[in-house]
Image (tube, rainbow, N blue to C red):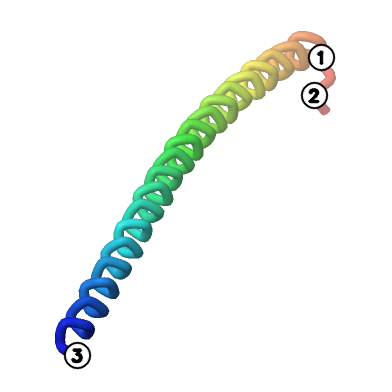
Amino acid sequence: VLVYRLRVLVYRLRVLVYRLRVLVYRLRVLVYRLRVLVYRLGVLVYRLRVLVYRLRVLVYRLRSQNCLKMSRARPGNAT
């Protein structure tokens, strides 16, 4: 009876170890995927910042050009 119980215990331990290994593997895969997602999100945020910066520069240039054009076109009609 003791030998049987020991075998059952060993079997259960093996199953537990196997399940733990599977869980650790899944966790590693999840962490890897999360890292990839975070990296991609960082790249996207960086690209968005660059785009916003370029748009701001363009808008600033356009505004300055428009102000210059307006002031040149109507120097005396500022009433």
Query: Residue 20, located in which quarter of the rendered image?
Result: bottom left
Q: CA distance from mark 2 to mark 1?
A: 7 Å
Q: CA distance from mark 1 to mark 3?
A: 107 Å
Residue 60: where, in percent of width, then height?
62, 22
15 sits left or right of 68 in the view: left
The image shows residue 1, relative to residue 70, as above or below, that is: below
Say which label, 3 or 2, has the lower sequence index. Answer: 3
Residue type highlighted by circle 1: Arg
Residue 42: where, in percent of width, then height?
45, 37
* Quadrant location of the N terminus in the rendered image: bottom left
Within 10 Å of the Cα at label 2, are there few (<14), some (14-19), or many (20+) other Cα atoms? Answer: few
Residue 14: where, in percent of width, then height?
26, 66
Disc 2 vs disc 1: Cβ atoms closer than 8 Å? yes
Q: Nearer the viewer, mark 3 or mark 2?
A: 3
Mark 2: which secondary structure? loop
Residue at image position (48%, 31%) is 43
Residue under circle 3?
Answer: 1
Query: Residue 66, located in which quarter of the rendered image?
Result: top right
Disc 3 vs disc 2: Cβ atoms closer than 8 Å? no
Mark 1: which secondary structure? loop
Residue at image position (58%, 21%) is 54
Q: Which mark is residue 78?
A: 2
* Quadrant location of the C terminus in the rendered image: top right
Residue type highlighted by circle 2: Ala
40 sits left or right of 27 in the view: right
Residue at image position (43%, 36%) is 39
Q: Which mark is residue 74?
A: 1
Within 10 Å of the Cα at label 1, are there few (<14), some (14-19), or many (20+) other Cα atoms? Answer: few
Residue type highlighted by circle 3: Val
Q: CA distance from mark 3 to mark 2?
A: 106 Å
